[in-house]
């Protein structure tokens, strides 16, 4: 039997639903929510709460990931030079899968403001007010 390599990112993606199940199991066990509420049978019953709800609506934002610091504000000139090369050092085998090659940012960086901070082309508007940031 061959086990496919399993990255940390893939493990978190596939186990994300499990965290919700763990939270629900803990709430059911502690009596914080009843099984009928979990099934949605009495959803909206506000008579039992010790405070009146203030929110009329909820906007739920699930933002998976985001741009890397090396693609936004953390320019690495040596990484640009070493793009595509193997790692320059030996590492212990602690990862789930084989390690790839070095990968430079695909975005262009320029100096902005009096402070001279390098900002990638991903944030053209932030680059215009970079002196207020640093």
Image (tube, helix red, strand yellow):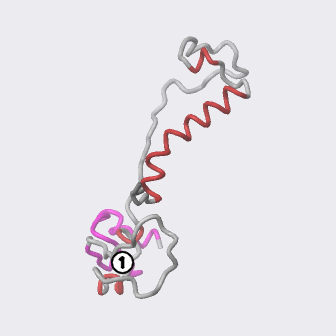
Which structural element holds mark 1?
strand
Q: In the image, what residue occupies the spot 28% across and 80% down?
A: 84
Q: Give the quadrant of residue 121.
A: bottom left
Q: Which residues are magenta?
A: 108-133
Q: Is residue 9 above or below residue 40?
A: below
Q: Which residue is mark 1?
A: 118
- Specify whether 3 is left or right of 82: right
Q: Quadrant of residue 102?
A: bottom left
How many numbered discs?
Answer: 1
From what the image shows, is residue 50 above or below residue 117? above
Quadrant in which the N terminus appears: bottom left
Residue at image position (31%, 71%) is 120
Give the percent coordinates (x, y) of residue 63. 42, 47
Residue 46, given in percent of the width and then of the height, sits at 63, 15
User: Which x, y percent locates residue 23?
Assistant: 62, 36
Of the pair 88 and 31, the residue shown nearer to us: 88
Q: Is residue 109 magenta?
A: yes
Asked whether 72 falls inside the magenta stretch, the response is: no
Using a 10 Å C-alpha cutoff, classify the residue at mark 1 as few (fewer than 14 neighbours), some (14 to 19) or many (20 or more). Answer: some
């Amino acid at each position: 039997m061959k086990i496919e390599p399993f990255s940390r990112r893939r493990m978190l993606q596939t186990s994300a639903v499990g965290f919700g199940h763990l939270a629900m199991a803990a709430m059911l066990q502690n009596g914080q929510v009843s099984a009928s509420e979990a099934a949605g049978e009495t959803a909206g019953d506000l008579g039992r709460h010790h405070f009146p709800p203030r929110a009329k609506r909820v906007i739920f934002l699930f933002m998976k990931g985001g741009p890397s610091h090396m693609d936004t504000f953390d320019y690495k000139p040596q990484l640009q030079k070493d793009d595509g090369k193997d790692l320059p050092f030996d590492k212990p085998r602690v990862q789930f899968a084989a390690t790839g090659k070095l990968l430079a940012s695909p975005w262009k960086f320029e100096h902005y403001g009096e402070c001279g901070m390098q900002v990638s082309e991903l944030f053209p508007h932030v680059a215009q007010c970079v002196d207020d940031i640093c």
